[in-house]
Structures are given as structure tokens and as C-alpha cells.
Amino acid sequence: MNETAAVSLQGGAPSAAHNPFPILELIGLNKAFGEQLVLDSIDLKVRPGELVCVIGPSGSGKSTMLRCCNRLEEPSGGQVIVDGTDLMDRQTSIDRMRQKIGMVFQQFNLYPHYSALGNVALALRLVKKLSRSRAESLAFDALSRVGLADRAGHYPHQLSGGQQQRVGIARAIALDPKIVLFDEPTSALDPELVGSVLEVMRELRDIGMTMLVVTHEMAFARAVADRVVFMADGNIVEQGPPEQIFQAPLHERTRAFVEQRH
Ligand SMILES: Nc1ncnc2c1ncn2[C@@H]1O[C@H](COP(=O)(O)OP(=O)(O)OP(=O)(O)O)[C@@H](O)[C@H]1O
Ligand SMILES: [Mg+2]
């Protein structure tokens, strides 16, 4: 073994792919709406620092899976384990656990009568019960991180869609979550505004944020994801590194889907 390898084995941070302790783990996750089984025994792990992209046709269950991860949608069965705690356990405080799980939606859901700073600070005050001054200080830090320090005093209608979504991301990361879940964060944006949001997500990945991202942005998934999960009909058909999913998929359905999206 050479010296570099020995050092990295002893002291270096393990790469995300080999870290054995997932931040998020879904085990046998089921979800039915009435008679319709929408998630069929999903198993998925997201490890610290990983950016996992979920792709798949409309109606395949991507949003439902994401929403089950913080029980915005109530699973019908299975386990959802976040940072070692089972969300389905009756003893678990879901409010406390939700502080660990950031969520960024397709629609930004900002309060129109609060400034960018106000929107982010409000989340901190409500969720973390921080004082106004402490919340505003952390909110400003989060806005700076998404490149909006100079827009902190602007109201949502004074911001572009891309800037509003970056406020949404700032609101999620200000809470210092263990993982951030994104559901098609760029789908509501004009094409020219998509890049700025993806760039922020790329930067978050570079500072080690753990992210699970449902996206139709194949180029983004291909360039930035550590792993890509292809879903169809409530199942994970295939998952692997982007090179596998986009260049050498193991399943015919994956191949057909990515070909049609190119
Ligand atoms: N609240 C609900 N009640 C009944 N059925 C629902 C509900 N939410 C979702 N579904 C159904 O569950 C299935 C999966 O929906 P989901 O929104 O998770 O798909 P998706 O993969 O996110 O699709 P898209 O790419 O269009 O966003 C669909 O058949 C949908 O009609
Ligand atoms: Mg969806």
C-alpha cells in the first residue's frame, strides 16, 4: 500500500459512496392511495454528502416517495429512517425530526408580504424558536450562500423566479438540516433562470450537503449526481452512477426513458 492510500484509510474522510451510515434510509416503503399502490416496497439509502437524483416518468411515484421522507405523505408501510431515527416509530417527535429535513418545492411557497430575509428568518423563528436578531443573522448567512446577500430586503414580487427559488433553498439550508429534499426545483422556472438554481445546488453539493433531488434536468443529474435512481410504476427499476444510467443502463425501461429525454 502506498503512503497516500494508508493516510486516507487512517484519517481521511471516507468517500460518500463507502460511508456505511446513511442519513436517509427507506426500507420496504409502501404507499397506497385507496386501491392504487403508488410505492411498492422501496429500498433506498442516501449517505452523508451524497447527491442522489431521482428520475422517471410522470406518475411513477417520485414526489410521493419524497413526501414520505418527512411524512408530509403518510406511508402505508415500511420504515423511514433519518439520521438513525425511525420516523414511523410512535415515540419519534415528527416536529423535531422535520428540523433535520429541508424541503424545496417546485412552487417556492414564499410569503409575499415578507422580504427574502423575512421569509428565511421566519422559518428559523418558528422552527428553531430563535430570537429575531439571531434568526436574521443566520438568515442573512443562508441568503449569502445562495448569492442573494444584496437582495435580502427584496420582496418576492421584486425577485425573479430563480431568485425566489434560491430564497426557498436558503430557507431550507438555514435550518442546518441533515438532508435537503428537492422536488423538481427548477420545473416552474423560465429556461434562462434554471442555471442559477442548479449552480447553487452544485455549490451545496461541493460543501457536503446531503441531497435527494427529483428532477427532469437530465444534464444536471448526469453532471452532478453521485447516484441516479430511475423509478417507474412505484418501483426503483435501477440505480447507479450517472455513467451507468445514461450510458450503459442495465434495464430496457431505463434505456428507453433516458433515450427519449435526450
Ligand atoms: N393525494 C393523492 N391521492 C390520490 N392519488 C395520488 C395522490 N398523490 C399522488 N397520487 C397518485 O400517485 C401516483 C404517483 O404520483 P406522484 O405525484 O408521486 O408521481 P411523480 O412521479 O412525482 O409524477 P410527476 O413527474 O408528474 O411529478 C400517481 O398515479 C398519482 O395520480
Ligand atoms: Mg412529482
Image (cartoon, rainbow, N blue to C red):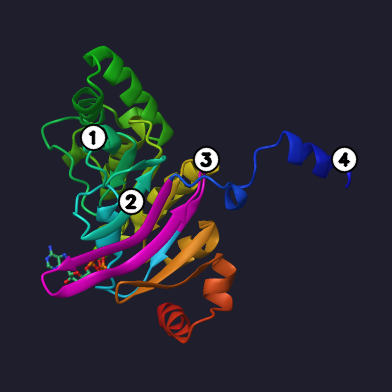
Separation of disc 2 and disc 4 at Cα? 40 Å
Helix, strand or loop status at disc 3: loop
* Residue at position x 54%, y 67% in the image: 240
Judged by depth in the image, the label closer to the viewer, 3 or 4, is: 4
Q: Is residue 50 above or below residue 123?
A: below
- Crowding around mark 3 (Cα neighbors within 10 Å: few <14, some 14 to 19, many 20+) is few
Residue picked out by circle 4:
3
Q: Depth check: give the residue in front, 101 or 106.
A: 101
Helix, strand or loop status at disc 2: strand
Judged by depth in the image, the label closer to the viewer, 1 or 3, is: 1
- Crowding around mark 2 (Cα neighbors within 10 Å: few <14, some 14 to 19, many 20+) is many
Q: Amino acid at mark 4?
A: Glu
Residue picked out by circle 2:
80
Magenta segment, prevailing SS (helix, strand or loop): strand
Separation of disc 2 and disc 3 at Cα? 22 Å
Judged by depth in the image, the label closer to the viewer, 2 or 3, is: 2
Helix, strand or loop status at disc 4: helix
Q: Amino acid at mark 3?
A: Gly
Instruction: Say whether residue 76 is left or right of residue 234.
Output: left
How many numbered marks does the figure carry? 4
Helix, strand or loop status at disc 1: loop
Residue picked out by circle 3:
208
